[in-house]
Amino acid sequence: MNRYEKYKRKITRYYNTISRYKVKLKRKFIKLKNLIMEIGISKDEFSLLEPKKQIISYPCHLGIIIIGDFNNNLYPALRKNIMGIFGPFFYHVHDLGKKNSLDYFPGDSFKKGIKRELKEDNKSLETLRLHPTKKFHQLLIEKKKTHDIDIILAITDLPLYSSYDKQIIFLFGETNLKHYCSIVSSFNLKEEFYNRRNNYNLFKRRLIKEAIHEVGHLILGPEHCVNDFCVMKYSSDISDIDKKSSHLCRECYEKLLNKRKIYNL
Ligand SMILES: [Zn+2]
Ligand SMILES: [Zn+2]
């Protein structure tokens, strides 16, 4: 065998080894991609895990975004009620529009991180697909950048589970204090969820309370109030929401006044 033949064989051997590794790597890549789909972590969401703390000065700009198919325009009522309590903290409330969820989560991203839960309906068992709150927070961080908004509140018609504690399912809302964004789910605010007759006014009242509650966290901090009638009281079920009002109690209002003093509002 001459030298040329020897090298040719060597190159073929190397080429075959590389091809084998290529197949192996491809398999590993597919496995990893499936795992990512399952646990709901992507490159974008990793950036959520290492957040730069945003510093906000008041007054600032609040944006409201509606994600889902809502028959009525919820924006005016949300704006009016939020401004009624937190008005001095905002220059303006921006209507960032309404679109269905698939428009916001194109392709596979809608399915990412879904958790399946069984729910008993009137007659049968229904499988519901719950979405992680972090998926929404990531979207909201991007929306804040594109709209040049400081604080953002989103309303979705999809059921949620908490990305921070996966045992917390069908939660009403969650706020990310580092990124100043909140998500409220209307899914289990509807009477139909409890196998009762549709009551739009009751639904709207609940939604407003939860929206105020989450914006309240953004301004007043993560603590909950102990007063049953205060909007900042934690609601573990729907009856808790119905018990509380859409207002701040005396103590929470004092806290709000102190915040206003800090920012000269
Ligand atoms: Zn809360
Ligand atoms: Zn209170």
Image (cartoon, grey):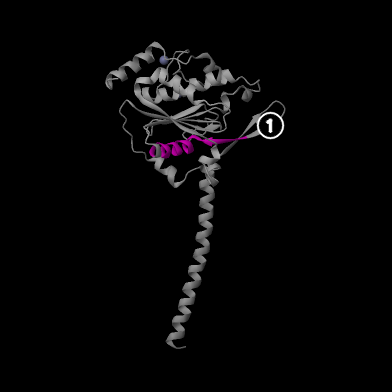
**Is the CB of mark 1 within 8 Å of ligand 1?**
no
Q: Position of residue 223 (x, y in %)?
A: 40, 22
Please name whichever residue, 16 or 50, is drawn nearer the observer in this view of the structure.
50
Query: What type of secondary structure mainly makes up the magenta span?
Result: helix
Q: Which residue is mark 1?
A: 125
Considering every residue shown, the one lying at the far right of the view is 123
Please name whichever residue, 181 or 125, is drawn nearer the observer in this view of the structure.
181
Q: Position of residue 157 (x, y in %)?
A: 56, 31
| Quarter-of-image position of residue 124 | top right
Give me the residue at 46% from left, 29% from top: 174
Q: Position of residue 36 (x, y in %)?
A: 50, 47
* Magenta stretch encompasses residue 167: no
Question: Is disc 1 surrounded by few (<14), some (14 to 19) or many (20+) residues within 10 Å?
Answer: few
Q: Position of residue 117 (x, y in %)?
A: 61, 34
Q: Is residue 121 visible?
A: yes
Which quadrant of the figure shows ligand 2?
top left
Magenta stretch: give its range: 128-145
Rendered position, 148 above or below 207: below
Tag count in the figure?
A: 1
Give me the residue at 37% from left, 13% from top: 251
* Magenta stretch encompasses residue 137: yes
Q: Is residue 166 left or right of residue 193?
A: left
Q: Is residue 237 visible?
A: no
